[in-house]
Image (spheres, rainbow, N blue to C red):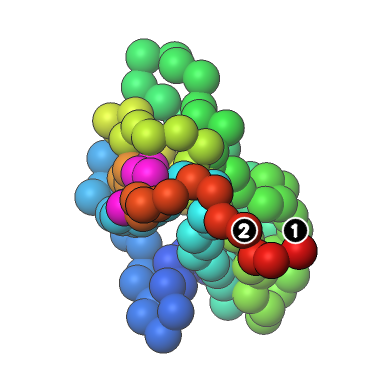
Amino acid sequence: AIHDSVALVDGERQLQIAPGAGQLNPCAFGTVHVNQRQARQLVVGNAGRFNFDVSWELVVPGGGIPPAAVSISPTFAVAKRGEKTTFELAYKPVREAPLPPGLTAVCTVTNGRRFELNITGEGRMPLVRFSSLEHDFGA
């Protein structure tokens, strides 16, 4: 039998992800400045006696194309027995816009369970205004 577990690590916090389709496992990036990068760690644990394959994919409802601002690296790995395998979920918006509603990161364990993570976030421009666009530093 496959003894798998998936956890979302955000700094010091660790959240176990419930297996099964339709589970509400949130991953909220919140508001991220354009061209800034936020990342979360996804840790797959293997407490069994056998290695198993793990794959991740981004899914948009209705068959849409996942935004380039979100990435998972690597998308495939082998979880070795008794060890933990770490993946990185990153969000780097390049324009002001929210992520598509229903964006999901799906983890599939070969011959095992499926884990789904609902991703939300919004890219925003920083609230910086320059009073002058030029300055002479006395060159």
Query: Residue 53 placed where, x, y %?
Result: 70, 52
Quadrant where the C terminus is found in the figure: bottom right
Residue 47 sits in quarter? bottom right
Quadrant where the N terminus is found in the figure: bottom right
For the record, the magenta segment spans 123-127
Q: Amino acid at mark 2?
A: Asp
Question: Of the residues under marks 1 and 2, which one precedes in the sequence?
Answer: 1
User: How many marks can you see?
Assistant: 2
Query: Residue 56 placed where, x, y %?
Result: 59, 44
- Is 123 on the left-hand or right-hand side of 66? left
Query: Residue 129 placed where, x, y %?
Result: 35, 51
Reply yes or no: does residue 78 show up in magenta. Answer: no
Q: Amino acid at mark 1?
A: Val
Frontmost residue, 108 versus 120 = 120
Mark 2 = which residue?
A: 136
Q: Residue at x 38, y 44 (%)?
A: 125
Q: Is residue 111 above or below residue 42?
A: above
Mark 1 = which residue?
A: 78
